[in-house]
Image: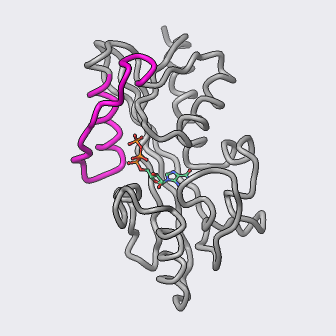
Amino acid sequence: MKEIVVATTNKGKLKEISAMLEKLGIEVKSIKDVLGYNPDIEETGTTFTENAVIKAETVMNMIHMPTLADDSGLEVDALDKQPGIYSSRFMGEDTSYDIKNQWIIDAVKDKEDKTARFVCAMALAIPDEETKTFLGTFEGEINDCIDGENGFGYDPIFYLPEYGVTSAEIPIEKKNEISHRGKALEAMKKALKEEEAGK
Ligand code: ITT
């Protein structure tokens, strides 16, 4: 595959996915590059994987090109795995991440269990092929303050005990090596390689 359209409106995701795919020699386009606008897609699924498939197939059916979609989010164990699939809609789509992040910090402040994880489901929809899905997870804890300028979304409160910093304090290359998104893309790479070898 030489070219792939990434069905996302999220600039942070696009930057990370582009950095990973360009390393494989794949040219990345956003839906806006191809369609000229971002279609409004309702995420009606009940799991990350269902939503990733909805996004990938909706866009692929519009443009008839290989399309990759990412549905991801933060699961906080002490909050019954919320915000989960509602991560971008949590507290309202237009609420700033400073406010969302501080709300989560306060909500787990007195909880013993601060564990959390990012989950990423990727769906690859190719014309006339069955859609393939891949899952990656990234374990961490909720930090006690907002720290770091890198990444996006909930990265500034996602503490990595092994590194002693949040995922907003590590460079993008490092995050891509260890993150939910990096792992899902690694699984996709492996599946595509195996498929190629079997042809
Ligand atoms: P698209 O649907 O257009 O791709 P979105 O941001 O609405 O964009 P999702 O519905 O998958 O995408 O929601 C993902 C949210 O989960 C994202 O907006 C962040 O709040 C959070 N998230 C996912 N991965 C993250 C990461 O690597 N770092 C920080 N926050 C992340």
Q: Residue at x 47, y 47 (%)?
A: 120
Q: Position of residue 175 (x, y in %)?
A: 68, 48
Q: Position of residue 126 (x, y in %)?
A: 36, 18
Residue 36 sits above or below residue 186 on the image: above
**Left or right position of 78 against 169:** left
Query: Which segment is the magenta one?
Result: 32-59
**Left or right position of 128 against 105:** left
Q: Residue at x 31, y 43 (%)?
A: 51
The image quarter containing residue 123 is top left
Q: Residue at x 36, y 25 (%)?
A: 37
Q: Viewer-proximal residue, 69 or 104?
A: 104
Q: Viewer-proximal residue, 122 or 148?
A: 148
Q: Position of residue 136 (x, y in %)?
A: 52, 47
**Left or right position of 166 against 124:** right
Q: Residue at x 23, y 42 (%)?
A: 42
Residue 138 sits above or below residue 33 on the image: below
